[in-house]
Image (cartoon, grey):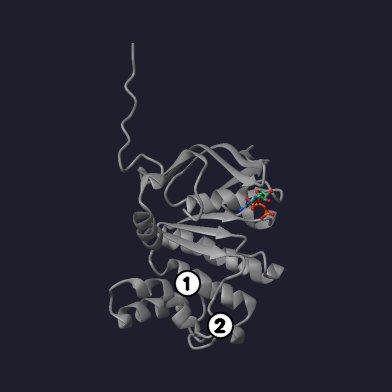
């Protein structure tokens, strides 16, 4: 008897589906293979931690998921769309609308306030600025910065700056937030508090989070831990 495979519908396909992903960098005459055949599925709403030794390929994989870099071979599907079959313009549009980024170094613009920084990615949309500012204010309040809206990054603590970066990443209501060592530059207590914030946002907004971290205590609080070693998932 033959069985018919279940067709992929909007309800049952994973949000992210990575198949046989390889990434190599060419350094002079040498080729360095950093990702060596990654297969991974991430369902919508999951909070995933990626852990592994330095150089294992964690950031490279995160960058490819966010289309900040291209795979050498293999495919990445996001809601059944093959990301690397899109044109650059389509990728930019998709990235801006559906993916938020939080990095170890928050990359806030020093001459702009917390509110202005949080609004920044939304400003390219043709929407009234007042509407964007209202949403950013609500988000900054949600991340505990209601009293810091008009402070510039230099007038905020490291943890507060990172919260602004989280608000900025969430403003477009992305389906997926990619975070690369978001607590790496923070002291233990501030790092735990930021991770708690990400966990709350994941639960309340159902946003999917993929977080690269070296912190075992924090990764243990995720729904799932992916261990990478030498370019592979182990
Ligand atoms: N643009 C590049 N050109 C050449 N080699 C690169 C490039 N980017 C990364 N690499 C190499 O790929 C390997 C994996 O790097 P990656 O940043 O993905 O590791 P990681 O697991 O995130 O490490 P860490 O925990 O230290 O951030 C490293 O050996 C790195 O030197």
Residue 60 visible, this angle: yes
Circle 2: is it few (<14), some (14-19), or many (20+) Cα within 10 Å? few
Which residue is the site of mark 2?
110
Given residues 27 and 46, the one toward you in this image is: 27
In the picture as drawn, the residue positioned furthest to the top comes out as: 1
Would you identify the image quadrant in which residue 227 lies?
A: top right
Query: Pointer 1 and pointer 2: residues touching (CB < 8 Å)?
Result: no
**Res 219 label:** none
* Quarter of the figure with the N terminus: top left
The image's mark for residue 167 is 1
Local SS, label 2: loop
Res. 223 in view? no
Image location of residue 114, percent across then percent down: 50, 82
Q: Is residue 115 left or right of residue 37?
A: left
Position of 53 relative to 177 (above/below): above
Measured from the top left, where is residue 137 in percent x and y? 41, 80
What residue sits 31% from the left and 79% below the top? 131
Which quadrant would residue 205 be assigned to in this image?
bottom left
At x 66% / y 47%, what residue is drawn? 27
- In the image, 81: left or right of 169? left
Count of numbered badges drawn on the protein: 2
- In this view, the residue in front, 51 or 21, is 21
Q: Is residue 37 above or below residue 199?
A: above
The residue mark sitting in front, 1 or 2, is 2
The answer to whether residue 66 is above or below residue 143 is above
Badge 1 or badge 2: first in the primary sequence: 2
Q: Secondary structure at mark 1?
A: helix
Q: Residue at x 65, y 49 (%)?
A: 51
Give the CA separation, mark 1 to mark 2: 16 Å
| Residue lying at 60% horizontally and 64% vertically, measured from the top left | 182
Q: Residues within 10 Å of mark 1 (few under 14, many from 20)?
A: many
Q: Position of residue 150 (x, y in %)?
A: 49, 88
């Amino acid at each position: 008897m033959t069985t018919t495979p279940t067709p992929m519908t909007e309800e049952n396909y994973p949000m992210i589906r990575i198949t046989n992903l390889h990434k190599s960098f060419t350094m002079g005459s040498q080729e360095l293979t950093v990702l060596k055949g990654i297969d991974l599925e991430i369902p919508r709403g999951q909070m995933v931690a990626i852990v592994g030794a330095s150089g294992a390929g964690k950031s490279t994989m995160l960058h490819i998921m966010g289309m900040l870099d291209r795979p050498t071979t293999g495919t990445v599907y996001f809601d059944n769309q093959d990301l690397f079959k899109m044109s650059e313009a389509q990728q930019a549009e998709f990235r801006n609308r559906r993916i938020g980024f939080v990095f170890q170094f928050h990359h806030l613009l020093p001459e702009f306030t917390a509110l202005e920084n949080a609004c920044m990615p939304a400003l390219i949309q043709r929407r009234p600025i007042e509407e964007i500012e209202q949403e950013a204010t609500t988000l900054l309040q949600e991340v505990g910065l209601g009293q810091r809206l008009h402070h510039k990054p230099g007038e905020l603590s490291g943890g507060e700056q990172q919260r602004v970066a989280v608000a900025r990443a969430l403003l477009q209501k992305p389906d997926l937030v990619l975070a690369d060592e978001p607590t790496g530059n923070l002291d233990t207590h501030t790092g735990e508090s930021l991770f708690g914030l990400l966990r709350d946002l994941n639960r309340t907004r159902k946003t999917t989070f993929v977080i690269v971290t070296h912190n075992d205590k924090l990764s243990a609080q995720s729904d799932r831990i992916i261990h990478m070693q030498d370019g592979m998932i182990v």
